[in-house]
Image (cartoon, rainbow, N blue to C red):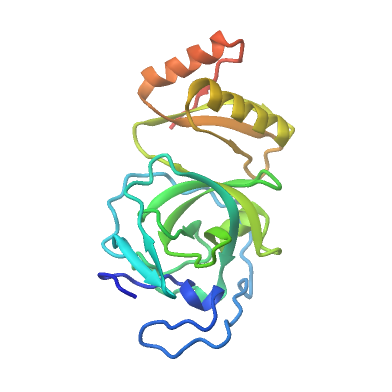
Amino acid sequence: MKSKSFALPALAVVLFMTGCQVPGSSPVQQAPKDGPPLTVPQGLANLPDPEVVEESRSRYGNPSTYTVAGKTYRLMATSRGYSAEGLASWYGRKFHGRRTSSGEPFDMFALTAAHRTLPIPAFASVTNLTNGRSTVVRINDRGPFHDDRIIDLSYAAAVKLGFEGSGTARVRVEILEPGRDIYLQAGAFASLSAADALKARVEQLTGQPAFVVKVPGDSLYRVRIGPVKGRSEAAAVQQTMSSAALAEPLILPH
């Protein structure tokens, strides 16, 4: 791999790929399987979301480009505004304690994730599109190096999203910005389809990003808007929605 001070991700090639060469090692002939912890801590499904805070880019794991298994990846200049839908997978016991791309040890019981091209660290909301469950993760690793997947989550994040038994799930990933950014809540629904319909209407009407969240213990799917910049922009969103005969969204506390 061509990089400067760049650590291979904890799951890099070993978990998802076969027959490729990691620098300084022999070729991997068969990918050993990962798995859950031998003992699952109580309350893992109800871990509080990490606080979204301002962090400098990691000294490690942020080269402009890097190559894995003959494929070159180019890092995004900024994470702002990133949103994507696709498959998520998870990694756990096999990589617990190993060094991540940011240089930190991987903790399968923390709400973290790996992404191929987002600057690290970054914070993202991840929503399971099958059951509506949502969590916030801190992205501090590289991967998954498997073309049909967009993010790799820690075991704890997979538990919160309810797919630790199936291995993969279709998710929505949306970057969260810290500090002065404001979020609003546009509505809450018992039906995911109703929430998704309002999300689409809000985005078309206001031009602002919107997302659907459902936290453990809450039966409702909540439509949230943001991040928006400051109170004046939040007030403009409220006015736009009121003028369209929609309920005025509430500004959420930080």
Q: Residue at x 58, y 61 (%)?
A: 148
Where is residue 75 drawn, in percent x and y?
Answer: 35, 56
Q: Residue at x 56, y 52 (%)?
A: 47
**Residue 5, located in which quarter of the rendered image?**
bottom left
| Quadrant showing the C terminus | top left
Look at the image and tell me whether residue 250 can be seen.
yes
Q: Nearer the viewer, residue 71 or 103?
A: 71
In the image: residue 28, left or right of residue 87: left
In the image: residue 104, left or right of residue 4: right
Where is residue 218 drawn, in percent x and y?
Answer: 67, 38
In the image: residue 8, left or right of residue 147: left
Q: From this view, report whether residue 47 is shown above or below residue 195.
A: below
Where is residue 14 drawn, in percent x and y?
Answer: 51, 78
Q: Residue at x 66, y 65 (%)?
A: 167
**Residue 120, located in which quarter of the rendered image?**
bottom left
Q: From this view, report whether residue 175 is shown above or below residue 24.
A: above
Where is residue 188 drawn, in percent x and y?
Answer: 65, 28
Look at the image and tell me whether residue 155 can be seen.
no
Q: Nearer the viewer, residue 232 or 77?
A: 77
Q: From this view, report whether residue 232 is shown above or below residue 19.
A: above
Query: Total marks drawn?
Result: 0
| Quadrant showing the N terminus | bottom left
In the image: residue 227, left or right of residue 149: left
**Residue 140, located in which quarter of the rendered image?**
bottom left
